[in-house]
Image (tube, grey):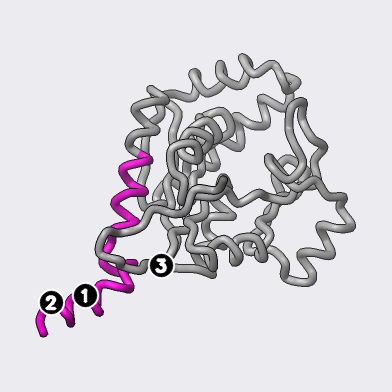
Amino acid sequence: MEVPPESDPHGFKRRGVLFVLSSPSGAGKSTIARKLLADEPGLSMSVSATTRAPRPGEVEGKDYHFVDLEEFRRMATEHEFLEWAHVFGQRYGTPRAPVEAMLAAGKDVLFDIDWQGAQQLFQIAGGDVVRVFILPPSMAELRQRLLNRNTDAIEIIDARMARAAAEVSHWDGYDYVLVNDDVEGCFRKVQTILAAERLKRSRQTGVIGFIRKLMA
């Protein structure tokens, strides 16, 4: 049974949060995203569409929507994406309709996207977007994590490391920057950020009615 989104005891309505996690590949954002989804019943994952082939264990509709290049181009042409980008010769994009449906149902939406996607999403949704960038403790540690995955050829890992440096250079386009030298500790900080952002006055659209009653 689906658990309803967390409600305020005073009945305040609020706008949803579009919660973005970005990091270089291997810095841990996907692990933190999974933990966040498990602990936050009012949070739903935005599932990206991609032209790359599924990796072992990946499930269609859960990890990604796997589409061919022709279908991806059609979706982009017909403005069905909130954001999309080229990454390592493949294309990734956020389908618009599912995100809008989740917001309409009163859910917050989690995005596992890169800096380009975060920038595009912010341009569209502005104040509803919260951007968190996760850094590795060092580039040497990042490389070792990629090697430990044992899923990519060394030339792909070299390309990911080169891209990581470029991605880190965009750290100042984010609202929060965290170092993931301990997954559990970093996860707790991300969870705290989400809780605080949900409580921002600008999102508490129902507080005006409460204040009026309070002052009557």
**Where residue 183 appears, x then y in whole percent?**
42, 25
Could you tell me how far apart the alpha carbons at marks 1 and 3 are, in whole angstroms?
Answer: 16 Å
* Placement of 86 over or under 148, stated as above or below: below
Query: Which residue is the site of mark 3?
Result: 15
Question: Closest to the observer: 207 or 144?
Answer: 207
Could you tell me how far apart the alpha carbons at marks 1 and 2 are, in whole angstroms?
Answer: 6 Å
Amino acid identity at mark 2: Leu
Could you tell me how far apart the alpha carbons at marks 3 and 2 are, in whole angstroms?
Answer: 22 Å
Examine the structure image and report whether residue 56 is included in the region drawn in magenta. Answer: no
Amino acid identity at mark 3: Arg
Q: Quadrant of residue 61?
A: top right
Do labels 1 and 2 touch, CB within 8 Å? yes
**Where residue 188 appears, x then y in whole percent?**
34, 34
Give me the residue at 34% from left, 57% from top: 198
Give me the residue at 75% from left, 48% from top: 65
Query: Which residue is the site of mark 2?
Result: 214
Task: Nearest to the eye among marks 3 and 2: give it.
Answer: 2
Examine the structure image and report whether residue 210 is included in the region drawn in magenta. Answer: yes
Give me the residue at 44% from left, 54% from top: 5
Q: Is residue 194 left or right of residue 2?
A: left
Query: Which residue is the site of mark 1?
Result: 210
* Placement of 131 over or under 62, stated as above or below: below
